[in-house]
Image (cartoon, helix red, strand yellow):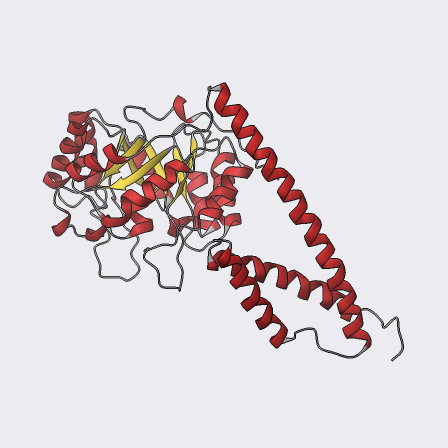
Amino acid sequence: MKLDLNIAPLSSWMPASSEPLIISGPCSAETEEQLLSTAHLLKATGKISVLRAGIWKPRTRPGEFEGIGAEGLVWLNRAKQETGLPTAVEVATAKHVEMALKAGVDILWIGARSTVNPFTVQEIADALQGVDIPVMVKNPINPDLSLWIGALERINRAGITKLAAIHRGFSSYEKSAFRNEPMWDLAIALKTIAPNLPILNDPSHICGTRDLIGFISQKALDLDMQGLMIEAHIDPSVAWTDAKQQLTPAALSELIDTLTLRTPDSENSEFTNKLTEMRGSIDRIDDQIFQKLGERMSIVEKIGTYKRDNDVTILQVNRWDEILQKRTAIGEALKLDKDFIEKVLELIHSESIRKQTAIMNEEKTAVK
C-alpha cells in the first residue's frame, strides 16, 4: 500500500538555514519580552530554521494556562520582523487558522489532540481551502496510523501540497521513561507507505524531560527524519507550560552540535558493494525463516485437526509456558533481547491460535 499524496518537496518550502532542520521556540508565548528574548537568542545560534510558539494551548483540564491567545500573534510577528525567522503555530479551529493567516504566520501545525478528531481536522481543512501555506500534522495521541493518515489526506485534499508529518509519540498506560512512547514502528510505517512525505520528530513531547532529548533526536535522525521540533525557553525553570522539557537556547545549540548527520545512501562503491553483499545474506536468511514458519504452521494445522477430532481445547497453558521458557533461554544465549523474543513468540502463538480456531469451526473429518 502506498499513500497517494500530492506533496511538494520539503526543500521547496522549508528554510534550510540549519542542518539538521530545526524548528524551535517556547512551548507557550507567555509575555512579549519572553518570546522576543528567546527568539533573539535562538537566532544568534545560527542553527534555527523556524521559530515556533504556542499561542493556543489545548490543556487536559480547565483552569490551566491555555495560551495567551491572539495577542501572542502580534508578538510572534514582531519576533519575525526582528530576527528574520519564519514562524510556526499550532491551530485547532477554523478561527485559529483565520487569525494565524491574518497575522502573517508562515507555517501551521495541527496538534495531536486535534489529529485524533476527524471533525476537527476537516474544519481546519475547510478553512485552508484556496490557501497556499505549509501545514505539518502531528500524530494522534493514541497509536492509530489510520487517523494520522486520514488527517494528512484531509489537509492534502484541501489543496495543501506543502505538507509534512510530525512524530511526537503516543500516549500509553504503561509507565516508561518517556512522556509519550515513541513507537517508532508507526513512524516507520508512515514513512514506508508515503516515502515522499517529510517527517519531522518532536523529541520534547516524546521525552517530557530535557535529559532524554539528545538521545531521541539522534535516533530520529538515524531513522532518516528530516528535522526536529525542539522547545526552547529563555528560562525553562519559570515556564508556564512544560517546564521540564524545554531547553535554554544555549543548551539547544550545544545539543545540536552533538548530533551526527548520516545519509541514507553512499556514493562509495566499496561501501555499496559490501552493503549489497550483507543484504543478500539477510535476504537468504529471511527466506529460510519464512520457509520454516510455513513448515511450523503446517504442523500447527495438523495439531488443530487432531485436537478438534478429540475434543481437546486449543489453548494448552502448560505447553505455552514451556515454549516461552525454552525459546527465551535459547534466544538469550544467542544474544537476542528478551522483549524481542517474547514479541516474536507471541505473534507466532497468536497465528497458531487463529489457525487452530478456524479448524475447530470446521466439521469433524474423523470419528472418534
Is 236 positioned to the left or the right of 50 in the image? left
| Percent of width and height locating residue 344 | 56, 57
Q: Is residue 337 above or below residue 149?
A: below
Camera-side residue of 31 and 246: 246
230 or 340, which is in the foreground?
Answer: 340
In the picture provided, is 175 more to the left or to the right than 366?
left
Residue in the picture at 36% in, 54% down:
180
What residue is at 77 percent from the left and 71 percent from the top? 360
Where, by quadrant of the figure, is residue 27 drawn? Answer: top left
| Res 200 quadrant in image | top left
In this orientation, which residue lies closer to the viewer: 37 or 205?
Answer: 205
Q: How many marks?
A: 0
**x then y, percent, for residue 116:** 44, 52
Image coords of residue 6 (percent x, y): 52, 29
Position of the N terminus, as image quadrant, is top right
**Residue shown at the point (39%, 32%) measured from the top left:** 226
* Furthest residue toward front: 333
140 left or right, relative to 59: right
Q: Is residue 99 visible?
A: no
Rendered residue at 17%/29% (across/down): 45
User: Which image quarter holds the C terminus?
Assistant: bottom right
Q: Is residue 254 left or right of residue 167?
A: left
Q: Position of residue 259 (x, y in %)?
A: 29, 35
Q: Can residue 145 be seen at all in this image of the molecule?
A: yes
